[in-house]
Image (cartoon, helix red, strand yellow):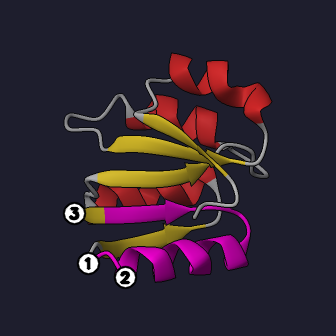
Amino acid sequence: MNVLIVDDEQLARQRLRHMLSGMGEQVVGEAATGEQALQQTMNANPDLVLMDIRMTGMDGQESAVYNNQIDKPPDIIFTTANTDHAIEAIESNAYEIQLKPIN
């Protein structure tokens, strides 16, 4: 599976990359903002996007709305430390929500 990692915290991206490499998944890119996530999605065509909900600039929620408008949108799993955003994530067609820290 081709995975795009989106989080504004570099350490969180590194942790996810390390976890995925141990599972045999292919990380096709990383992004720190929602805008970068959209660009990477168009360029790398991932099957799955692991995306933080709250980021500066365009957040994960807004990026997901745009992602869902492309022909073959990737599945999105939101990663968040705050459960308050779960309803919003479901409304943006998130495949799943994972609470940080992810094990």
Residue at 26% x, 65% y is 2
Please provide percent x and percent y for residue 7.
Answer: 64, 61
Quadrant position of the C terminus in the picture: bottom right
Q: In this view, does 32 lie above or below 91?
A: below
Gap in Å between the C-alphas at discs 2 and 3?
A: 11 Å
Does residue 28 appear left or right of residue 58 in this picture? left
Gap in Å between the C-alphas at discs 1 and 2?
A: 5 Å
Find out whether residue 5 is within the magenta segment.
yes
Which element is circle 2 on?
A: helix
Q: Is residue 15 above or below residue 44?
A: below
Tag 3 near tag 1, CB within 8 Å: no
| Residue 72 placement: quadrant | top left
| Residue 39 placement: quadrant | bottom left
Does residue 47 appear left or right of residue 9 in this picture? left
- Density class for disc 1 (Cα within 10 Å; few <14, some 14-19, many ≥20) is few
Q: Which mark is residue 1?
A: 3
- Density class for disc 3 (Cα within 10 Å; few <14, some 14-19, many ≥20) is few
Reading the image, the residue beneath label 2 is 21
Work out which residue is located at the far front of the displayed protein and give it: 103
Reading the image, the residue beneath label 1 is 24
Tag 2 near tag 3, CB within 8 Å: no
Which element is circle 3 on?
A: loop
Q: Upstream in the sequence, badge 2 or badge 3?
A: 3
Q: Is residue 33 above or below residue 17?
A: above
Callout 3 amino acid: Met
Residue at 25% x, 53% y is 47
Residues in magenta, as a range: 3-23
Tag 1 near tag 2, CB within 8 Å: yes
Please provide percent x and percent y for residue 66.
Answer: 46, 33
